[in-house]
Amino acid sequence: MNKKEYELLSSSEVTYLLVGLLIGMGALALPNDVMATAKQDGWISVLLGAVYPLLIMFLSVYILKNNPGVNILSISRNFFGKTIGNILNLLFAFQFAFYCTAVTAGCSNILRLYVVSFLEPIKIFILIFVIAAYASSRGLKVVARVNEIVFYLTVLIVILPIMALKDGSVLNISPILGSGIKNIILGTKETIFAYASSEAILLIPLFIRDKNKIKSSFFKAIVYTALIYTWITFITIYYLGPDIIPKSLWGFISVTDSVKVPVINNFRFIFMYLWTIIILKTITNEYYFITFVLSDVTKIKRKIVNICIFPLLLYFTTLFGNEAQRRKIIAAVVVKLTLFNIIFIVLIALIIFVKKVMKDEKNSI
Amino acid sequence: MSFELENQVNSIKSKIGEKSPIVVKNILIGSGVEIQCAIIYVNGIASKEFIDRDILKPLMIYAKEDFNDKSNLADYLSKKYITSSNTQVDSNIDAAINSIKRGKTVVLLQNKSEFIIADTSGGEYRAISEPVNEAAVRGTREGFVEKLETNVSILRRRIKDDKLVFENITVGRRSQSDLVLVYIDDVVDKDMLNELRKRITAIDVDGIPLAGYIQQYIEDNAFSFFPQSFSSERPDKIEENILEGRVAVILDGTSTVITVPTLITEFFQAVEDYSQRTVISNFVRIIRFIAVFIIITAPSIFLTMVKFNGELIPIKFIVPIVESRIGIALDPFIEILLMEIIVEFLREGGLRLPSKIGQTLSVVGGIIIGDAALKARVVSPATLLIVGIVTVATFLIPNYDMSLTIRIIRFPMLITANYFGIFGIAAAWFFLTVHVCSLKSLGVPYFSIHKSDFKDMIIRVPLWMMNERPVAVPNNNKQRQTDFRKIFRGNEDE
């Protein structure tokens, strides 16, 4: 028994952590988002959307391979100097803060609509953040383990609506590729919110036990996520059809109505119960990574950061407002965030590449 | 140092405590110039029968030779005259004191530095009987008792491996209780063992009356609801745990034996799960997990449905529920809480009462109070039904510690459900998951998922398929059995 080994993440834990980072709130509204442009072929857009995390995967693996033993925060400080590096790091952390608050706001909206209409949003926010702060304070290993457990739960509740197959119609998804390749590709843009956050892997190379397996863990995570997302979008379109989906805010929830359970009037109650756990897991992940970066940049203990960001996140969450406003904000910010991420990561990868080439040349001379 | 008999006796007396019930008997042995001896023991813990038969009789009646020319008299006497099966010759006074405290008898010889220690430990102890609190239909009928030696012998009889180690430690400043660590040397993980040893030897308290004290002294998370070490009075359960690479801790004077490190899943595995047929055990296990879920969540879900989400109750159910609630002044939350607390009263009360009165309590409590509460319109029948189901479900958890834990968890769950509805229940479950994942037992994760361990978690696969020890418990030897069934089944077992 090696104590240190116990603290490091096994390769399966890395996979589940990444799946946990990827799958969250976005899944419920994913069919609605892609439907707007890709219509009945939305599910193909979702499948293609996996290109974004794949890109992140290749870049991350390249960066981590060439800089063993350090995370992206140190690399960025190393390349851009302490001040600019840290500013970039904070911007990099901003995505976690943004997703954390956006998901919390969304969680409150959806919960209040379907099951807890009597609760004020602020109470929901407080409970969510208290739990996220507690979970985050327990450390990455615990967070990863929770992700693993929640993954099994996710698979269970995503598969259950398989019963909708008998009520749906193949007409809803045909003609396949009928909405045009261009629209399908444009539709992938809408999946970015759903596929975001996998960049976090760049922060935790020191916590991974088997560094050679990062790529396979990452790839597995993307495959699982893409399958789950595609299935969700497919079954939603198959069950509801492209005309009805836009009429509900979260298309997938309507599909869950196809599951009949005795004693309870509708399965939505159970579904919301289980999905709340999934959302809490996502928020916990984001919360953890905010504290991780902030503690790294400010050199304040993570436990203290953990408490300090609580009121800040609470305040920012209240700014999102109702679902329509929230989606507007997300649509406006996500593209910029993603652009920043891509530029930041590509830039670092490029610098590493150039340095490597120069070094090789030097060596050859 | 003078080896005058009187000096030696006084020195031992003063070290054990002048007011201890020490018995000193001076005798003369040998012919010719007789040699003066003294035998010392503590009244009550040494068996007088053994002393008379194995020490006094041979020395006083049969030892009729001249011992004055014997240079190594203690050794000679213990070899030739003292018929006790376990004797040793020592010259260290501390060893003598330690032995006397444990029921042994010391024979001091005039003007000799060496003395004889004979094992005469005895005294009255409870006989081996079936553990009352952990009954099993298809398990062993013997349970651990309060005597350390007996408990050690029970385990020794069950595991005859030459690598089985019994390691003695003394704990407690004043009680100086004996404690034994039991493990299989080539299976147990040495880091974990060292950690346990470190924690136990570090315990510095006056006394440790019961094994439960040790559990609390060595655990990581003192404020958690969850028991972080496993305890049982059943030797079959402890044997199974030792074979899986755990360490058993036996404390003298208590019939509860602890094993560490502990996983949360252990508490839901009864000993019969393994002796019964696979399919039946699996069925029982699944029932047990459903029971756990019901205990923790059923009152809370009922509360949210009655209080907040009435629309979820099917129309056929809602009419009787509404009818039954007419005229009840209490809020559903207070109503459920009240009933749950009354059930806890009955349970805790029944625990302390003699069994005959206990039955009266359960009749009066269960039937009369329940009926009266209904008639007085304090609670609705539906609430009583839920509380009743939950109470029955608590009896399904095989481990007492864990059943207490699970029972307590339902109260915070009920409170969060009252303020946050179903969202509160989901959040509380998530919190529980995080909490359980963050617990550790001797540095080993309390709950961890390993693919190979799925064979014995929620379900149990046929015994012959479990070729490896659980990965979650660190060990040095993975293999515990081979594919022996292939010899007679060929490849048919798939």
Image (cartoon, rainbow, N blue to C red):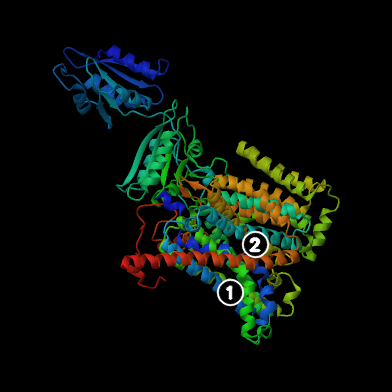
Q: Which residue is mark 2?
A: A274
Compare marks 1 and 2 and give the one earlier in the sequence. Answer: 1
The image quadrant where one finds the C terminus of chain B is bottom left
Helix, strand or loop at label 1? It is helix
Left or right, residue A292 beside residue B305: left
What's the residue at 43%, 16% (across, down)? Answer: B19
Helix, strand or loop at label 2? It is helix
Q: Is residue A241 above or below residue A197?
A: below
Whether labels 1 and 2 share one chain? yes
Q: Is residue A63 above or below residue B332?
A: below
Please say whether residue A152 is visible from this viewpoint: no
Q: Is residue B358 above or below residue A72?
A: above
Q: Position of residue A342 (x, y in %)?
A: 55, 67
Disc 1 versus disc 2: distance between alpha carbons? 26 Å
Amino acid type shown at disc 1? Gly
Q: In which quarter of the view is residue B307 placed?
A: bottom right
Q: In which quarter of the view is residue A227 placed?
A: bottom right
Of residues A343 and A151, the one drawn nearer to the viewer in this rendering: A343
Q: Which mark is residue A74?
A: none
Dot 1: few (<14), some (14–19), or many (≥20) neighbours within 10 Å?
Answer: many
Q: Say how many tags the image has.
A: 2
Q: Position of residue A68 (x, y in %)?
A: 41, 59
Chain letter behind tag 1: A
Of residues A139 and A361, the one drawn nearer to the viewer in this rendering: A361
Please say whether residue B102 is visible from this viewpoint: yes
Dot 2: few (<14), some (14–19), or many (≥20) neighbours within 10 Å?
Answer: many
What's the residue at 35%, 22% (across, down)? Answer: B41
Amino acid type shown at disc 2? Leu
Chain letter behind tag 2: A
The image quadrant where one finds the N terminus of chain B is top left
Q: Which mark is residue A49?
A: 1
